[in-house]
């Protein structure tokens, strides 16, 4: 694991990425990584952008023959009805035009 200290351009670190979902068979991706470029964290979006799990559609639907949304294991399911809601207020819809949550 990498230390939490500061590193700079050209530094090489060994650490693990991901693998914390608790899904059987899920494991971290481990390797050595080299810092190739540093930035201030700012970026400019150059195309349509919606801040959601479906924002990719704005850029890709115009050029794709078809967009397939698939169900895959993970800590954040694509279908909000699959979450085990414990504090969801009455009346919230879990999908567009879906039924209101009973509360």
Image (cartoon, grey):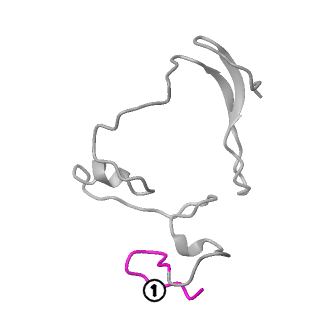
Residue 11 location, x and y as percent?
Answer: 64, 13
Tell me what residue is drawn at x 74 percent, y 21 percent. Answer: 5
Farthest residue toward the top?
Answer: 10
The stretch drawn in magenta includes residue 95: yes
Residue in front for this viewpoint, 92 or 80: 92
Residue 29 location, x and y as percent?
Answer: 66, 37
Type of secondary structure dominating the magenta stretch: loop
24 sits left or right of 91 in the view? right
- Residue segment shown in magenta: 92-103
The stretch drawn in magenta includes residue 3: no
**For mark 1, does the 10 Å Cα neighbourhood hold few (<14), some (14 to 19), or many (20 or more) residues?**
few
Q: Secondary structure at mark 1?
A: loop
| Tag 1 residue | 99
Residue 43 location, x and y as percent?
Answer: 40, 32
Instruction: Tell me: residue 70, above or below residue 26.
Output: below
Tell me what residue is drawn at x 71 percent, y 45 percent. Answer: 27
75 sits left or right of 99 in the view? right
Tell me what residue is drawn at x 61 percent, y 71 percent. Answer: 83
């Amino acid at each position: 694991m990498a230390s939490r200290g500061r590193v700079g351009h050209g530094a090489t670190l060994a650490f693990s990425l991901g693998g914390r979902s608790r899904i059987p068979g899920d494991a971290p991706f481990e390797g050595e990584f080299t810092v190739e470029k540093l930035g201030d964290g700012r970026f400019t979006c150059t195309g349509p952008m919606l801040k959601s799990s479906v924002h990719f559609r704005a850029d890709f639907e115009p050029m794709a023959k078809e967009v397939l949304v698939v169900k895959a294991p993970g800590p954040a399911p694509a279908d909000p009805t699959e979450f085990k809601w414990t504090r969801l207020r009455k009346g919230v819809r879990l999908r567009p035009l879906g039924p209101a949550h009973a509360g």
